[in-house]
Image (tube, grey):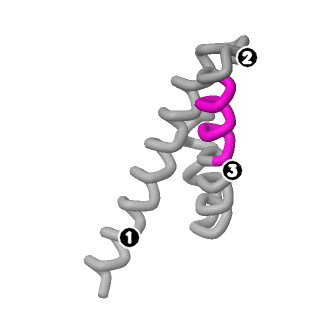
Amino acid sequence: MKIGELRDKSVDELNDQLAQLKKEQFNLRFQKATGQLEKTSRVREVRRDIARIRTLLNERRLAAQQQA
């Protein structure tokens, strides 16, 4: 997922995306623990996507505070 794609989304959409990624991260961790994880690189991708979304949400929150 590219940061440009995320910047076009609203805060609600980002929060929904974040919730989906956290569920996927949980499932991937569970698959890894049981030895069923086939695409191990997906763990890293999901973790980084979560970080991107959190960073973007934080930037928007700080920008809103500065305007107020």
Residue 25: horizontal and vertical position, in percent? 60, 38
Disc 3 residue type? Answer: Gln
Mark 1 or mark 2: whose residue is earlier in sequence = 2
CA gap between label 2 and label 3 equals 20 Å
Residue placed most toward the observer, 42 or 9: 42
> Can you tell which mark lies on residue 30?
none
Count up the numbered dots. 3
Residue carrying label 1: 61
Mark 1 or mark 3: whose residue is earlier in sequence = 3
Pick the quarter of the image with the C terminus: bottom left
Residue 2: horizontal and vertical position, in percent? 58, 35
Give the magenta-colored segment's residue range.
23-31
Disc 1 residue type? Answer: Arg
Residue 59: horizontal and vertical position, in percent? 36, 60
> Is residue 57 on the magenta stretch?
no
- Name the image quarter holding residue 5: top right
Main secondary structure along the magenta-highlighted residues: helix
- Tell me: 48 left or right of 30: left
Disc 2 residue type? Answer: Gln
The residue located at (57%, 67%) in the rendering is 11
Which element carries disc 2, helix, strand or loop? Answer: loop
Residue carrying label 2: 36
Which element carries disc 1, helix, strand or loop? Answer: helix
Q: Residue furthest front?
A: 34
CA gap between label 1 and label 2 equals 39 Å
Mark 2 or mark 3: whose residue is earlier in sequence = 3
Residue 63: horizontal and vertical position, in percent? 34, 70
Pick the quarter of the image with the N terminus: top right
Residue carrying label 3: 20
The residue located at (68%, 40%) in the rendering is 24
